Amino acid sequence: MRYAIFGDIHGNTEALGAVLLDMERAGADRRICLGDVVGYGAEPGECVRTVRDAGIETVQGNHDSAAIGETPLDYFNPYAKKAIEWTSGAIGADESAWLRRLPLTIEGDGFTVVHSSLSRPREWGYILDWASARRCFDLLSSTACFIGHSHVPIIFKKEEDGSIADLPELSAPLAPPARYIVNVGSVGQPRDGDPRASYGLFDSGGRTVEIRRVEYDYRSAQRKIIDAGLPEFLAMRLEAGR
Ligand code: ZN
């Protein structure tokens, strides 16, 4: 089975449309969403409807949670805060209800899905180094944990002897008995210096993962952000991929 695992769409319909098309071309059998469907971008309602109406299993992200008033705004930086307040007013009751129903984790066929970390998932900590990766590995009962949240793709591997390292390549085998944490990057707001949308393609039979990058019309997404009166910085960063 080929799983397309994607998230951090952030109200960017252009990027979402491009990755959905790429998944189809890549022969994905099933799609799973890592959350943060909304926040930052100008079309949060459209993104919720696209993911919801396609019946894509989705976990809740911190922006999804904040947009429905479940995570306090003081957690966020001023740009994010402004965008969340705007998003709360822009989504309808149906979309809010869907965001509210999302689980924090999903258990798949030999893998686990969570937006931030298995360690206190509702506190939205980041996995950026080996220490934070270890806290997540300690709670992982499957071979691989797929995450988003930082918008930077990276793969951490924990060997049987307990040692942890991040892998130099973003296409890798995910073979037991080692365990893995795979950050698939962000669809709608990449921050690794590459403006192309990012997601993961996981082959559960061959046990391999590939991080794919997809070009999309970021200028159109930028224009919508400016037209909506959202902070200009949120438009600029799409172009820089930062
Ligand atoms: Zn995010």
Image (tube, rainbow, N blue to C red):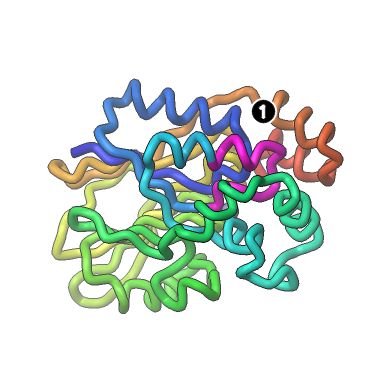
In this image, 161 relative to 148: left or right?
left
- Residue stretch rendered in magenta on the structure: 36-48
In this image, 30 relative to 9: left or right?
left
Residue 41 in magenta stretch? yes
At horizontal 53% and vertical 51% (from top left) the residue drawn is: 152
At horizontal 48% and vertical 69% (from top left) the residue drawn is: 129
Q: Quadrant of the N terminus?
A: top left
Foreground residue among 28 and 166? 28
At horizontal 31% and vertical 26% (from top left) the residue drawn is: 26
At horizontal 81% and vertical 37% (from top left) the residue drawn is: 228
User: Which residue is label 1 attached to?
Assistant: 218
Return the residue found at the far front. 93
Q: Work out whether residue 195 can be spotted.
A: no
In this image, 63 relative to 34: left or right?
right
Percent from the top left, x then y, of residue 203?
22, 41
For the residue with label 1, is its CB less than 8 Å from the closest atom of ligand 1?
no
Dominant SS of magenta comes to loop
